[in-house]
Amino acid sequence: MAIRRIALARVDELKPGMTRRFAFERDGQRTEAFVANFRGQYVAFVNQCVHLAISLDLDDNDFFTGDGDFFVCKTHGSVYEPRGGKCIGGPGQGKALEPLPVVVEGNAVYLELTE
């Protein structure tokens, strides 16, 4: 198996409370996703609500609730725990966003895919 790294952001570009959309190819399909800095921890998820197959952010690159404690689906109001992606409120409760592996090396944040 080979490991493929995709650069997502420089650490200094993704300060706590910030998110960034990105897309990558997986199994020949384009996959929309986002990376976030949640209180100093970098996490990434597929950008798809567990309730219906739509993006959480409605293309505005804003995934956090107003207080910055959770991710929120702007269409359905589903609320997600940022560290694990579990839906803790609203439609889809109990399900989870699909996590993606993130690696920080030097001053860069990478998506790390095993192929």
Image (spheres, rainbow, N blue to C red):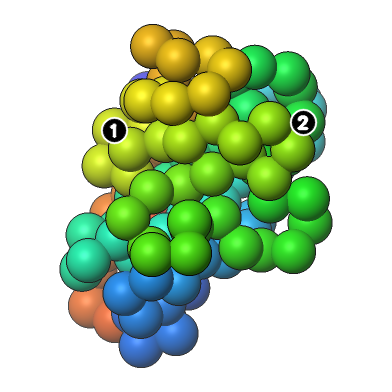
Q: Is residue 29 left or right of residue 51?
A: right
Distance from disc 1 to disc 2, alpha carbons, whole Å, reads 19 Å
Within the image, what quadrant is residue 80 found in?
A: top left
Query: N-terminal of the two: label 1 or label 2?
Result: 2
Q: Is residue 102 above or below residue 48?
A: below
Amino acid on which the number 1 mark rests in the picture: Gly
Q: How many marks are shown on the rendered structure?
A: 2
User: Which residue in the protein does label 1 denote?
Assistant: 84
Q: Is residue 51 above or below residue 3?
A: above
Q: Residue at x 68, y 31 (%)?
A: 76
Name the spot of residue 115 as percent of width and height, x first. Answer: 47, 26
Q: Is residue 100 above or below residue 20?
A: above
Name the spot of residue 57 as percent of width and height, x first. Answer: 68, 51
Q: Residue at x 45, y 72 (%)?
A: 18
Name the spot of residue 19 as percent of width and height, x first. Answer: 50, 65
Amino acid on which the number 2 mark rests in the picture: Ile
- Which quarter of the image is occupied by the N terminus? top left
Q: Residue at x 44, y 85 (%)?
A: 13
Q: Residues within 10 Å of mark 2 (few under 14, many from 20)?
A: some
The residue nearer to you, when weighing 12 against 1, is 12
Name the spot of residue 85 as percent of width and height, x first. Answer: 38, 32
Q: Residues within 10 Å of mark 1 (few under 14, many from 20)?
A: some
The residue nearer to you, when weighing 112 against 88, is 88
User: Which residue in the protein does label 2 denote?
Assistant: 54
Q: Is residue 56 visible?
A: yes
Checking the image for residue 69, the label placed there is none
Q: Give the SS element for disc 2.
A: loop
Q: Residue at x 45, y 15 (%)?
A: 93
Q: Is residue 3 visible?
A: no
Q: Give the SS element for disc 1.
A: loop
